[in-house]
Structure formats: structure tokens, C-alpha cells
Image (cartoon, helix red, strand yellow):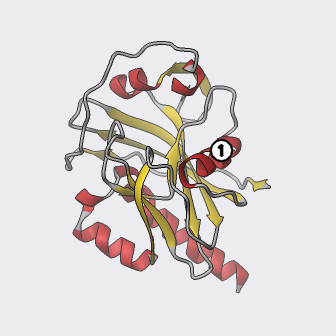
Amino acid sequence: MIRTPSRHRCDDFLLTRREFAGASFAPFFITEHAMEDQVILVDENDTEIGVEGKMIAHRSGSLHRAISIFIFDSADRLLLQKRAASKYHSAGLWSNTCCSHPRPREECARAARRRLREEMGIACELDVKFGFVYRAVLTNHLIENEFDHVFFGRHDGDPVPNPDEAEDWKWVDLAWLRADLNERPHAYSFWLEACIDRVIACREEDRTRVA
């Protein structure tokens, strides 16, 4: 079950101060799996305006829809994944539990459940918490420009990550993560840094509401 509160909009982020691992890229071709290689283009209000090839969108900097999932355990620790070395950008960086893009005509909630299973082998209830826009210029000639929908979920137990997506994982305390992001920002994905303060605030609101 997905519960959808009103959407919130954060400030845009332009992150250029860190270098990110890049990879060589083959030309983009339409294949029988082309649906998986397309992203949904949106305006600043998250209104759909078209579709575009994923790599084309990341080269041109087109604003497109994305999802980010944060899974917490009963001790309120966050599950991080270390992105696989084969990823086309931000390879080898620590990030939140799962990140991806919905396919054309796919709702964000459905995409979040699907990608969480595919990347980390986890199936659990997810709640959408907020949306934000960030823009990050990478040194490998790619641009992340995303309207990101953030989901929270709860799961106890070890994940079963897909090695093509994540090469490692760990549970961390949010206070520790905030401090480590301050000390070692180069070790983390840019979108995690962009939204971590809002994530921490949402968790505090959730604890207050339960209490």
C-alpha cells in the first residue's frame, strides 16, 4: 500500500565541486528493451511533457522524473548501498537504499516497489514523503537534472543485492551519516547529500507523530 501526502518542493541544487567516477559510453540504440532505457521528461511542476532516452537525457540535462528509496530498520538505521563499479555514473559511491527512474506510463510508486526488489531483493510497504529538484554537473560530460520522488520503507534483515547494481551495503545511524557526509562528501552520491537534511527532518517528524 502506498500513501501519498501533498508534494513538497525543495530548492534546486547545482553541485559541481566534486569529481565523480565516469565510464565510457556506447552510442544509444533503441532495442527490444527500449522501454527500460527511456525516462519521463517533466516540467518544474512534475507535469509530464515527453520521454527521452536515458543517456540522451543525461547528456543534454533534460529535467526528468526519478525515485529515491530510503529503507530503515526497527532501530531506525538507514540501509545504504555502494553503487557497483560498472554503473554509468557515480560508480563506487555510497548512496541511499535504491535510486532509479520510472518507465514511461509507470507510476512512481510501482517503479519504487519494482526497483527495490530488483536492486536489493526487498519487498515492503513504501510511503512517498516529498519531492525535490536537483541539478548536478558531472565531470564525465553527464548532467543529472531530476525531479526526485522520495520514498521511505521499513525492513529488518539483510538485503540480497543485485551485484550489477550494488557491490556492498551497510546499516548506518542518520546522525553518523550526516557527520560522515560533512567529512567525506566525495564518498557519497550527490543526490544523497542534496536531500539528507530533509530526510532527517522527515524521520524526526515521524517519530514525533508516533510519540
Q: Image check: 193 left or right of 156?
A: left
Dot 1: what SS?
helix
The one of 153 and 159 positioned closer to us in this rendering = 159
Q: Residue furthest top?
A: 30
Q: How many marks?
A: 1
What residue is shown with label 1? 114
Q: Residue at x 38, y 37 (%)?
A: 144
The one of 83 and 210 positioned closer to us in this rendering = 83
Quarter-of-image position of residue 62: top left
Q: Residue furthest right?
A: 1
The one of 46 and 83 positioned closer to us in this rendering = 83
Vertical comparison of 58 with 187: above or below: above
Q: Image check: 17 left or right of 148?
A: left
Query: Where residue 87 appears, x then y in whole percent?
Result: 36, 40
Query: Where residue 18 appears, x then y in whole percent?
Result: 21, 50
Q: Residue at x 31, y 46 (%)?
A: 85
Q: Residue at x 52, y 14 (%)?
A: 31
Residue type pointed to by label 1: Arg
